[in-house]
Image: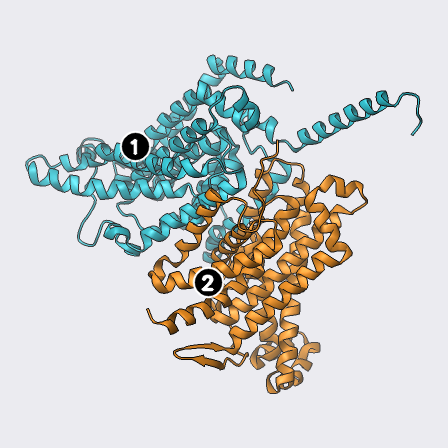
Chain colours: A orange, B cyan
Amino acid sequence: MQVDVIVQQLINGVTLGGMYALIALGYTLVYGILLMINFAHSEMFMGGAYVGLGVLTILTNEGAIKAVSAKLPFLSFLLSTRGFFVGSPIGLFVLFVIVFASAATVIGFLGVTIERVAYRPLRHAPRLAPLISAIGVSIFLQNAVLLWVDSKAIPYPSIFPVKKLLEFGGASINSLQVLIIVTSLVLLMILDTFISKTRIGKAMRATSQDREAAGLMGIDINNVIATAFFIGPALGAVAGVFHGMYYGTVIFSMGFIPGIKSFTAAVLGGIGNLRGAMLGGFLLGVVESLGAGFLSTGYKDVIAFVILILVLIFRPGGLLGESVVEKV
Amino acid sequence: MGGSKMDIATKVDAGRSSAVQKATYALVLLVVILMPIIFQGFGQLFMVRILAVVGLYVMLALGLNIVVGYAGLLDLGYIAFYAIGAYAGVLSGLPFSQFLAKTFPSIPWLPGISYFVMIPVAMIAAAITGICLGTPVLRLRGDYLAIVTLGFGEIVRICLNNNIFGLSNGAAGLPKAGEVMPKPAGLDWLQNTLYVQVPNIGPNGFNFTFSNNVYWYYVIVIFCLLTIFVVRRLDNSRLGRSWTAMREDEVAASSMGVNITGAKLYAFSLGAMWGGIAGITFANFQGFVSPESFTFMESVFVVSIVVIGGMGSIPGAIVGALFIQGIPEFIRGAAQAGWLEVIGINLSAEAQSAVSNYRYLVFGFLMVLMMAIRPQGIIPSKRRARELHPDDEKMLDESNETLFDAQHDTAIPGEDL
């Protein structure tokens, strides 16, 4: 295998890893506080991609705007703003800020709602109950999209200009990859600061250490949990939009495999540990890309599952986590 | 916590069943035996097929019930054992039947016995896989185990899809083009011997022939009965009691001398074994296997049958399978066969497909709802219902609180707070 192929796979891997890291944070945040695997998190990622798709379409697709404003006339102003969004670099920047912000907000509130409806009533139940409930939510959301949006893959509008920015030998990095890597790193840094510096971040850390003691110290536990269920899905939604832009299509079942892989990333880094989830995401992305290059692409998905099983058997605490002591 | 009283009660129950119970069982058995004959006789062939498929899911659910219901281990990759049983059954059964056909060309029914001969192969293949997976992962906590088994299920499916070792023939499935599964032994004889024709009943008369579907239906029913027998015995055995103890409190059980790893491995491999039997039966019934029958959603189906029916409960597994696999198929089939028009309901083609499409949506919703209002399932096992009730924990919390208050009060006597 030539060097440039390896370099190319590394670039692809880091891009993929950025998305995994963003999703993995959602798993780790919730696990750290509630000790539960939010199985429905992969659907947050999927939902984010669809919300992003919807917003992109309604802001830039002339046919779609006309169709919608025929029913809702007050939306016809979108026809005039369309030129601004597509025409200039500033418009493009504003467009994507709107797309990401709306996907993150909508899915963030969806996450909070799910927690309120499906998980909060089960907070005192045995640990299997919320897990099964989460599987139920996941099935529900997937099929809601299947039935009410589309059962087939939908192409993602290629509004973002994908250009080769740098070339090293045979390998290259394009503008979309740079966007994904930079945005995910920035978001990860913001989250890290948020958790370590702000008041609510401190409350979240306290809650994850000892929920009851934190409650006794005057922390509003429900508030903390709701915050975790907003931030996690919001980051997942951003990853979903990236995934749609990067691979060019979305489908209702797209969440499952990236979801499981990101969970693997969270476990790899040490579940409950935020920096671990980030590290695990990038590591998994790189390992998977290299593996797909070296082995056959058919077995690409097996790599993540094998890593998951091996980590859980040999180092259940993960790379950055402490060794897990079973509490009696 | 009243557990000891309960155990005595269930033991007494298990020993004797009342006359009413016996009559109910006999009635249910009669219905189970007569149903396919009636449906086949009146030409409603789709119903026989649906019943056989429901039977397969009952077998799967009873097998998974050992793992989830009795041992309390959530297995989200159970379908992998079903897949391994199915593929092992075809890979061993097909050459064996060809060998029999070549060696004894004068006995035409002989190749058909390959299914029955190869059942142990499928069982052992699945059980060995269960042990191989179980040994390293069973010391993981509940939700980690769920994810690992999920990963394992996907690994098996992806490997089958990629034609692993050149055996599984990739996405096209088995048997390969040009080969067919042998006709099951005795089917020809039954078809020629057992047929009833009564021309005067109903619009088209009553024409019963012993079809392929009827044959497999009865095979599946026999296996279900066998499974129920074994599972009941298991539940009341020493092993079953150690599963109960382990499920309720692993640490306490282990300090009472229960071999936790052993008990878990037994549960895992026994469950896998039943998955294997269901798998080989499915492969022969269907005459064909491909990786797409073994997706994660199938695992979720079986888990939801167990959960919605009632964990650890045998009637629950049966009702769950009827409810989840049977009712949607039945409505769709009945609509297609024009039954509903007879009773005055007119379902459009769209509505018919909506029934089958919306069932997944309804499942998801039901799973959430069940966990919130009835976590013990439709027909809960008596013992299990007590464990899964969220109120217990609250009660426990409250009793702890009062204990704490009491200690607190005695520690600082006379001091006002």
Measured Cα–Cα span from mark 1 to mark 2: 50 Å
Left or right of B189? Residue A101 is right
Return the residue nearer the eye: A61 or B274: B274
Kindly tell me whether residue B342 is visible in this rendering: no
How far from the left and from the top, in percent, is residue B416? Answer: 93, 27
Q: Which mark is residue A286?
A: 2
Decide: few, some or many residues near mark 2? Use Cα within 10 Å; few <14, some 14-19, many ≥20: many
Vertical placement of residue B210 versus A238, above or below? above
Residue occupying the point 45% across, 68% down: A10
Residue B185's x, y, as percent? Answer: 19, 34
Amino acid tagged 2? Val
- What's under tag 1, amino acid-wise? Val
Q: Which residue is more in the foreground, A227 or B29?
A: A227
Name the quarter where the N terminus of chain B is drawn. top right
SS at circle 2: helix
Please identify the quarter of the rendering in which residue B299 is found. Answer: top left
SS at badge 1: helix
Q: Does residue B69 lie above or below A79 as drawn?
A: above
Relative image position of residue B89 (x, y in whole percent): 26, 40
Per the rendering, the mark at residue B219 is 1
Residue in view at x 69 percent, y 81 percent: A77
In-front residue for pair B322/B100: B100
Task: Write down the chain letter for disc 2.
Answer: A
